[in-house]
Image (cartoon, grey):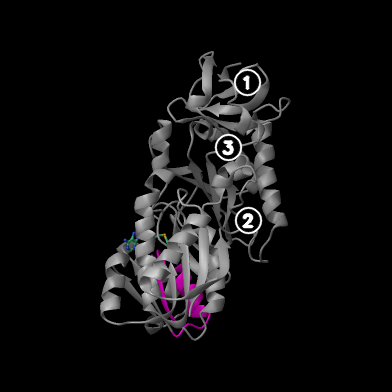
Amino acid sequence: MDALILKPDREKSLLRRHPWVFSGAIQQVIGDPASGATVEIFSADRQFLARAAYSPTSQIRARVWTFDPDEMVDVEFFRRKIRNALERRAAWNFSPRDSAALQPASGAMRLIHAESDGLPGLVVDRYGDVLVLQVLTAGVEFWRETLADLLLEVTGARAIYERSDADVRALEGLPPRTGLLRGTLPATRLTIDEDGLKFIVDVAFGHKTGFYLDQHLNRRRVGQLAAGREVLNCFCYTGAFSLHAARGGAKNVLSLDSSADALAIGQENAALNGFSPEALEWLEADVFTALRKFRDQNRAWDLIVLDPPKFAPTAAQAEKAARGYKDINRLAFKLLRPGGILVTFSCSGGIDAALFQKIVASAALDAGVEAQIVEYLAQSPDHPVSIHFPEGAYLKGLVCVKA
Ligand code: SAH
């Protein structure tokens, strides 16, 4: 068996069950492991620590499959892991509509959330009876065909579409790959149901795997907060927050995004759900520029949603990202009427919850407003966080009320 021997005292994170082994921790590679192959990890004094997937080009040189010396990494192992992930979600139904089972056929949820489901590098989302698969690491690439077969077998899905086009694959020495992997799919545009609202998801051309499922419960919350309010939804993508707000009784909703394609689908989504065109307004714009313009025009709203893309994928970009977050939050505080609500998010792995709260606080200070945090939001429960992998908690949200 190929193996990695760690340097002295570098076994601590594995003993705490954190699943990553960095290249700097490795003393010696025994054998000639192929990219993605399973290696055993030993401490400097030859104590067994884990079985892991080898990533020869990445700084994260190995990712743990199992800490159990008696557990083999084989087809049965992956079948067990996939079943476990589905069973956990079935036990955690957050509404009768959401289910890990592929019934009702239009429900959507994340079925496998990488490290947090014990499968580093594997993301699987279900959109009705179609799965979208993201392969992010050499280890998952190695087992890709097996995983595709098992996913069909365990879920009974009609098709699997692959969206392995995330930038992080380059760090693993893997080229981007997208396309139909299993089954048949007459069209890449599907319609899903979220809390009774219909949304078009384009699994081939949409962002990431097609839809931002992690915001599901937060959209539901915004729907509850929207009644009678004028709503500004920034970084709206295909309008999911907008439609929840409109159904919740918003007076009107203005949605901003820089992507014309996303906005076009947003408008289709509005029509699909029977909203009149006047209820929802869509604007193709850079949010940074648009908010300044609105400030200069003395415009005001009662509820503002800020759900920007990842400004800081890693801690190294945190400082520049912090300026971006502060800028949009400062402008949003200014644009809110007294008593208005700011629902603000960061999905940057490089910015933790405490730092994000500090950034929003200094944005309020600069805007010259008083505010209270009334709720803390996070990713929805189909995006769990392994207790040993705090990096899994990437989505932070604050609900602030302006004094
Ligand atoms: N809130 C959305 C997801 C937002 S994803 C939902 O619930 O579905 C982030 C969005 O920001 C993307 O749609 C992207 O096109 C958009 N975007 C990125 N940079 C932008 C900018 N500077 N101005 C406006 N939109 C931007």
Numbered label attached to residue 147 = 3
Tell us which disc is closer to us: 3 or 1: 1
Report which residue position mark 1 lands on.
Answer: 42
Q: Amino acid at mark 1?
A: Phe
Report which residue position mark 2 lands on.
Answer: 102
Tell me which image quadrant ligand 1 sits in.
bottom left
Could you tell whether 38 is left or right of 71 in the image? left
Determine the secondary structure under disc 2.
loop
**Which residue is located at x 41 percent, y 71 percent?**
233
Q: What segment carries the magenta color?
A: 230-251
Tell us which disc is closer to us: 2 or 1: 1
Q: How many marks?
A: 3
Assess disc 2: are there few (<14), some (14-19) or many (≥20) residues with their C-alpha within 10 Å of its C-alpha: many
Could you tell whether 296 is left or right of 191 in the image? left
Q: Position of residue 32 (x, y in %)?
A: 50, 15
Q: Position of residue 316 (x, y in %)?
A: 39, 43
Reading the chain from its start, which is encountered first: label 3 or label 2? 2
Q: Amino acid at mark 3?
A: Leu
Q: CA distance from mark 3 to mark 2?
A: 18 Å
Closer to us: 134 or 355: 355
Image quadrant containing the N terminus: top right
Residue 312 lies in the magenta-colored region: no
Closer to us: 116 or 210: 116
Please say if 358 is above or below 45: below
Assess disc 1: are there few (<14), some (14-19) or many (≥20) residues with their C-alpha within 10 Å of its C-alpha: many
Q: CA distance from mark 3 to mark 1?
A: 27 Å
Assess disc 3: are there few (<14), some (14-19) or many (≥20) residues with their C-alpha within 10 Å of its C-alpha: some
